[in-house]
């Protein structure tokens, strides 16, 4: 068990719909980063939340948005789904945001399929 | 644009073979290079390298960073079927501006298959 829980594990949505993915961070961690991993590709950084505020964003359009809650869990919301949004969405929690990658614990991801 | 490239993209070996996976990078504000193993979904941490020329080892796995060549290698000796996975290389950037903070740039990954 990794300590980071993501839900749901699998999801099928229709183009144009909206989706919310959830991530519970590991105990003691206050930072959550979200990544999109398309089939056959490496993960791409979407954004990071540190102490409930967005703390860095990758090259993703505004229809990708997020939240972090006081217990440091996080949500990723995607509006107006497109076929290219089909991917594995990974959440990683860590303590602090100054050392990227060190101490990251990844969740097992949510597999989103857009049809 | 920041970029991380891994080679080969896929590799098939037999148990007992030694493999070398390559990672090269072109980024601004390099801070660290990390290797992860991804078996099913969650990447698991293998190594973080920040200094050039210092080898890190864990069992049959080892890795080294060459900052002059902007590259790293991951070696696996005496491979086992349990080593079959995707190996991801990622570069962490120095925080400068809000866009870089906490961001990892990943390569495409190398898919390793170890046959019995």
Image (tube, grey):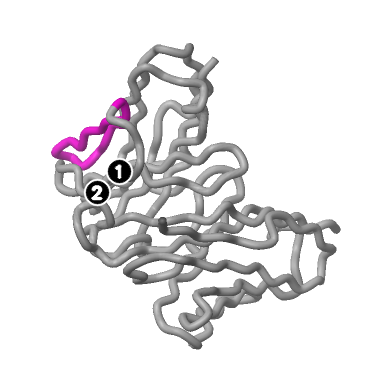
Based on the picture, tell me whether residue B55 belongs to the magenta stretch.
Answer: no
Residue A103 picture location, percent across and down: 35, 62
Left/right placement of residue A64 relative to residue A43 reads left
Q: Quadrant of the C terminus of chain B?
A: bottom right
Query: Where on the picture, by quarter, is residue B77?
Result: bottom right
Q: Quadrant of the N terminus of chain B?
A: bottom left
Left/right placement of residue A9 relative to residue A26 reads right
Residue A31 picture location, percent across and down: 24, 50
Judging from the image, mark 1 belongs to the subunit labelled: A
Height in image: A97 above or below A15?
below
Query: Where on the picture, by quarter, is residue B7?
Result: bottom right
Q: Residue at x 22, y 59 (%)?
A: A96
Separation (CA) of disc 2 from disc 1? 6 Å
Judging from the image, what secondary structure is the residue with disc 1 in? strand
Q: Residue at x 41, y 65 (%)?
A: B27
Which is nearer the eye, A71 or A97? Answer: A97
Judging from the image, what secondary structure is the residue with disc 2 in? strand
Left/right placement of residue B1 relative to residue A29 reads right
Label drawn at residue A63: none
Which is nearer the eye, B4 or B13? Answer: B4
Sequence-first disc among 2 and 1: 1
Q: Residue at x 20, y 37 (%)?
A: A68
**Residues under numbered marks 2 and 1 in contact, where contact means CB atoms less than 8 Å apart:** yes
Stretch of the chain drawn in magenta: A63-76
Q: Which residue carries the number 1 mark?
A: A47
Residue A97 picture location, percent across and down: 23, 58
Label drawn at residue A56: 2
Q: Residue placed farthest to the bottom in the image?
A: B53
Residue B99 picture location, percent across and down: 25, 51
């Amino acid at each position: 068990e990794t300590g980071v829980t993501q839900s749901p594990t699998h999801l099928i949505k229709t183009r144009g719909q909206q989706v919310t993915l959830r991530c519970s961070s590991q105990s003691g961690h206050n930072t959550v980063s979200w990544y999109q991993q398309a089939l056959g590709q490496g993960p791409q950084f979407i954004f990071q939340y540190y102490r409930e505020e967005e703390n860095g964003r990758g090259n993703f359009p505004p229809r990708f948005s997020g939240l972090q809650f006081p217990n440091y869990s996080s949500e990723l919301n995607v509006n107006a789904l497109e076929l290219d949004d089909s991917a594995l969405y990974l959440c990683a929690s860590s303590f602090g945001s100054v050392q990227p990658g060190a101490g990251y614990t990844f969740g097992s991801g949510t597999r989103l399929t857009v049809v | 644009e920041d970029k991380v490239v891994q080679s080969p993209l896929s590799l098939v070996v037999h148990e007992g073979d030694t493999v070398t996976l390559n990672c090269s990078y072109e980024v601004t504000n390099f801070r660290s290079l990390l290797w992860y193993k991804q078996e099913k979904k969650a990447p698991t941490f293998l190594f973080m390298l920040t200094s050039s020329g210092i080898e890190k080892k864990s069992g049959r796995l080892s890795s080294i960073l060459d900052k002059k060549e902007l590259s790293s290698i991951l070696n696996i000796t005496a491979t086992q079927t349990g080593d079959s996975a995707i190996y991801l290389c990622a570069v962490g950037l120095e925080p400068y501006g809000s866009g870089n903070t906490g961001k990892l740039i990943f390569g495409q990954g190398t898919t390793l298959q170890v046959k019995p």
